[in-house]
């Protein structure tokens, strides 16, 4: 059986809200929502980021990602608060794409309340913008708060998904490569010291799918399946990422970055 992504237009979300179940179960590698966010707004955001990049040549992200603070919980919440305004300014005067993602998740999960994760009255970070320059890539990896971030409350939810909005797509390279293999404990012998896993971890993988969404598209994946970003070979790749997690019978879908 072919492992193919599901593609829908943003106007078709309501009638296709159950399509997310195939991503959760692993029947499909990704749900691609075409034309999700206004391309003119994407261009404005890209220009604003370009200005900020000139101020800081080494900048690779705007906002906070929990993975950078796995063993520094208190610092994560401090940084999440400190950078909240910075992220908000990037979207100033435009439709906030994070709010649009939240309202879309509400369509996919009509029985639940979609909200930014909160722990001990501290709000998690909401959205991280990642910049991939020429030559940048992400090695084979998987994301799972229940394994990596056990000291954080978001780790208690059994189902986790990842949403990525493509603000700017690279002209060459920068594709998302998804592998039909989910993480298991014995895979840890293939783990790299810094980040990700060696190619050996997918030596028994039956299928891989390469996708290259367009500017303004939103992609939802189940990040327990191994995935990687291929090297960017022309111009910058800019994305906005948000995780979400929930339990089947719980009342909430919580989001964070």
Image (spheres, helix red, strand yellow):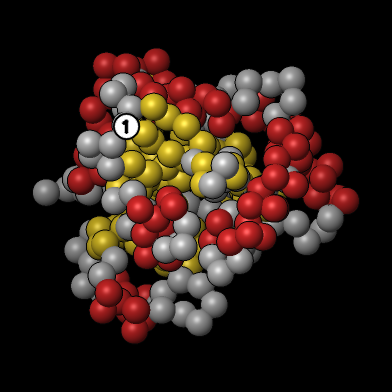
Residue density around tag 1, few if under 14, some if 14–19, many if 20 or more, within 10 Å: few
Q: Is residue 69 left or right of residue 133?
A: left
Pinpoint residue 184: horizontal percent, then vertical percent.
Answer: 25, 70
Kind of element beneath mark 1: loop
Tell me if I can see residue 88 in this picture. yes
> Which picture quadrant has residue 14?
top left
Q: Is residue 167 left or right of residue 53?
A: left
> Which picture quadrant has residue 208?
bottom left
Q: Determine whether 158 is above or below 251 in the image.
A: below
Considering every residue shown, the one lying at the far left of the view is: 1
Q: Is residue 16 left or right of residue 237?
A: left
Considering every residue shown, the one lying at the far right of the view is: 55
Considering every residue shown, the one lying at the far front of the view is: 120
Pinpoint residue 141: horizontal percent, then vertical percent.
Answer: 42, 65
Pinpoint residue 11: horizontal percent, then vertical percent.
Answer: 39, 15
> Which picture quadrant has residue 96?
top right
> Which residue is at a point 25% across and 62% down the rendered structure image?
181
Q: Determine whether 160 is above or below 31 in the image.
A: below
Q: Nearer the viewer, residue 234 or 88?
A: 88
> Which residue is at a point 31% across and 58% down the rendered structure image?
225
Tell me if I can see residue 233 in this picture. no
Pinpoint residue 152: horizontal percent, then vertical percent.
Answer: 47, 57
> Which residue is at a point 63% across and 59% down the rendered structure image?
74
Please give the residue where the numbered disc 1 appears in the rendered image: 251
Q: Nearer the viewer, residue 136 or 48?
A: 48
């Amino acid at each position: 059986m072919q492992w193919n992504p599901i593609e829908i237009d943003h106007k078709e979300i309501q009638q296709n809200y159950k399509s997310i179940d195939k991503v959760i179960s692993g029947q499909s590698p990704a749900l691609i929502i075409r034309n999700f966010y206004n391309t003119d707004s994407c261009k404005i955001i890209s220009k604003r980021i370009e200005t900020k990049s000139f101020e800081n040549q080494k900048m690779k992200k705007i906002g906070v990602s929990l993975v950078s603070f796995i063993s520094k919980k208190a610092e994560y919440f401090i940084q999440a608060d400190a950078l909240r305004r910075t992220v908000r300014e990037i979207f100033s005067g435009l439709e906030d794409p994070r709010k649009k993602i939240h309202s879309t998740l509400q369509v996919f999960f009509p029985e639940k309340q979609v909200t930014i994760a909160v722990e001990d009255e501290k709000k998690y970070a909401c959205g991280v913008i990642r910049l991939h320059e020429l030559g940048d890539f992400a090695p084979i990896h998987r994301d799972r708060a229940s394994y990596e971030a056990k000291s954080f409350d978001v780790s208690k939810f059994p189902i986790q998904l990842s949403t990525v909005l493509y603000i700017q797509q690279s002209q060459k390279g920068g594709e998302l490569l998804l592998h039909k293999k989910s993480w298991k404990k014995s895979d840890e012998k293939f783990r790299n010291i810094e980040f990700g896993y060696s190619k050996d971890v997918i030596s028994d993988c039956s299928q891989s799918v390469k996708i290259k969404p367009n500017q303004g598209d939103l992609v939802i994946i189940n990040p327990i399946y191994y995935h990687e970003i291929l090297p960017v070979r022309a111009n910058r790749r800019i994305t906005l990422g948000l995780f979400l997690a929930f339990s089947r019978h719980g009342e909430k879908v919580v989001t964070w970055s």
